[in-house]
Amino acid sequence: MPIKMLFLGIIVPLSILIPILFCIPKYKIAKVESRLLFYYLIISGLVNLAALILRNYHLTNLPLLHLYTAIEAVFILGYFRCIFEDAVIKKALGAVMIIFPILCCLNFIFLQRNTFNTYTRPLEAMLITFFCLLHLYKSGFSENWLKQPTNWFNAGILIYFPASFIIFISSNYLISSTNKTMNTMVWYIHGVLVMVMYFIWARGFKLIGNGR
């Protein structure tokens, strides 16, 4: 099996099991925001599995990617809606959680039915990064910063989504590029970032019970 397929097709998708396994023993005492991330990981794993099965049968998995983007945004923005205390921000997040999936549907129906969702994917990454930075700004730092699960979850988000924004916004160029080496390297980096986020989230799940 080629190294690229082994890493991107097996190792990276299976790494999602690490945070899931760390969360299961803590599930009963987990707060709503932690459970939302747990549900997101479960659904993400199932979508990845479905995408691999479709690929093995030489069927397109593009509709799944469009659906996954909407689901991912709803769960992670829902997580932020739980941890923000400002009522205005909560309302704004609630509105975005409704509007963004609608945009994903419109994008799929009218613009990018037969291609990657290179419009909504960067927008999603930008929105998640914005709300994560806003929460960091509003919450500040405390003595127990490293003992709070939420801060580990946010750290993972800030490692993956800002970088993925750059990757996704450049994806039209990457798809059409003849430079296979660069293309492969970019998706290797993306895979590593996904795994790092999962490892950091695993730490966050392990700390559940120590407070928000």
Image (spheres, rainbow, N blue to C red):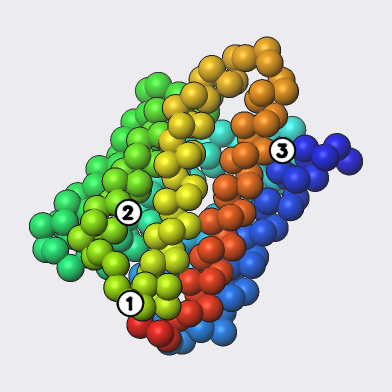
Q: Please, is residue 133 above or below residue 116 in the view?
A: below
Q: Which residue is mark 2?
A: 132
Q: Disc 3 to disc 2, how far (Cα)?
A: 33 Å
Tell me which corner region of the image, top left, top right, bottom left or bottom right, holds residue 79: bottom left
Residue 18 spot, x, y in % from top left? 64, 67
Residue 180 percent location from the top left of the image: 71, 20
Residue 121 to residue 10: above or below: above
Q: Answer with mark 3 or mark 2, whichever residue precedes in sequence.
A: 3
Q: Earlier in the sequence, mark 1 or mark 2?
A: 2
Type of amino acid at the residue the image marks with label 1: Glu
Q: Quadrant of the N terminus?
A: top right
Question: Mark number for residue 181?
Answer: none
Q: Is label 1 in a helix, a strand or a loop?
A: loop
Identity of the amino acid at label 3?
Answer: Arg
What whole-number distance in Å separates the C-alpha atoms at marks 3 and 1?
Answer: 48 Å
Q: Secondary structure at mark 2?
A: helix
Please name the residue shown 49% across and 48% down the image.
Answer: 160
Q: Tell me the crowding category of disc 3: few under 14, some 14 to 19, or many 20 or more residues within 10 angstroms, Cα based.
A: few
Crowding at dot 1, Cα within 10 Å, few <14 / some 14-19 / many 20+, comes out as few
SS for dot 3: helix
Q: Is residue 212 left or right of residue 178?
A: left
Look at the numbered discs 3 and 1 and tell me whether their residues touch, using CB distance below 8 Å. Answer: no
| Foreground label between 1 and 2 | 1
Residue that appears at 63% across and 35% down: 187
Q: Is residue 85 above or below residue 131?
A: below
- Residue bearing mark 3: 55
Q: Which residue is mark 1?
A: 143
Return the residue found at the far right. 1
